[in-house]
């Protein structure tokens, strides 16, 4: 599964694992994925959130306010929850819909928004991030990144 991920998306998952471990959680859920996304400061997903006028500090605070840390038991390899695995599936679907061969951090962001029920999706929705506007921002970002004007 991970071979389709860009280097940026792999970093996000690594950061999500660190976030979960720091909280003592033995699993990666949607909130850990979102925290991993916003930790990749120069990453594509952060640039898209900036385009959508989303405050990363407000996003982090909104998530952390609702998180309950685990009991300090961190596994050697932290597993994805079923909801987080679903985010990966949605990210793959979003990449395919946008005509991309690999899954980037921007697709993970779209997957989190599209799923909507997890803590991450709720936090994004509270800040006014909608799927269509995010998809449009991703398309524009990709065109600019590839050297085409939107």
Image (tube, rainbow, N blue to C red):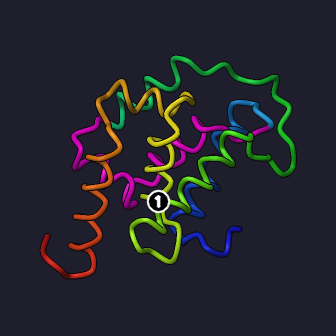
Would you say residue 30 sits in the magenta stretch? yes
Quarter holding the C terminus? bottom left
Identify whether 60 is placed above or below 69: below
**Compared with residue 65, is residue 50 higher up or lower down, i.e. above or below?**
below
Tell me if 134 is positioned left or right of 40 in this view.
left
Task: Find the magenta span and give its range.
Answer: 27-55
Image spot of residue 144 (x, y percent): 21, 73
Q: List x then y, in percent, for residue 81.
A: 74, 40
Please say if 137 is above or below 38.
below
Mark 1 crowdedness (10 Å alpha carbons): few <14, some 14-19, many ≥20: many
133 vs 79, nearest the viewer: 133
* Nearer-the-camera pick, 143 or 50: 143
Q: In which quadrant will I find the N terminus?
A: bottom right
**Which residue appears farthest toward the left when viewing the image?**
149
Which residue is disc 1 drawn over?
A: 94
Question: Element type at marker 1?
Answer: helix
Is residue 127 shown left or right of residue 118? left
Residue 65 lies, in percent from the top left, at: 51, 17
Q: Residue at x 64, y 56 (%)?
A: 14
User: Is residue 31 found inside the magenta-colored segment of the image?
Assistant: yes
Which residue is depicted at the point 22% across and 50% down?
Answer: 51
Kindly identify the residue that appears in the image at 31 percent across and 49 percent down: 134
For residue 34, side relative to residue 87 (left or right): left
Q: Nearer the viewer, residue 104 or 73?
A: 104
State the predominant SS element of the stretch in magenta.
helix
Q: How many marks?
A: 1
Q: Residue at x 39, y 67 (%)?
A: 98
Residue sitting at the far bottom = 147
Image location (x, y in percent) of residue 143: 24, 73
């Amino acid at each position: 599964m991970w071979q389709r991920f860009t280097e940026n998306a792999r970093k996000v998952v690594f950061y999500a694992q660190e976030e979960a471990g720091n909280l003592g959680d033995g699993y990666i859920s949607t909130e850990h994925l979102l925290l991993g996304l916003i930790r990749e400061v120069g990453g594509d997903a952060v640039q898209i959130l900036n385009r959508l006028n989303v405050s990363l500090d407000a996003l982090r605070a909104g998530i952390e306010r609702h998180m309950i840390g685990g009991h300090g038991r961190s596994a050697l390899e932290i597993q994805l929850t079923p909801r987080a695995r679903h985010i990966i599936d949605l990210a793959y679907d979003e990449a395919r819909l946008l005509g991309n061969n690999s899954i980037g951090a921007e697709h993970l962001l779209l997957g989190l928004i599209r799923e909507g029920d997890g803590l991450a999706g709720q936090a994004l929705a509270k800040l006014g991030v909608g799927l269509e506007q995010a998809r449009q921002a991703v398309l524009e970002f990709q065109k600019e990144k590839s050297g085409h004007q939107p």
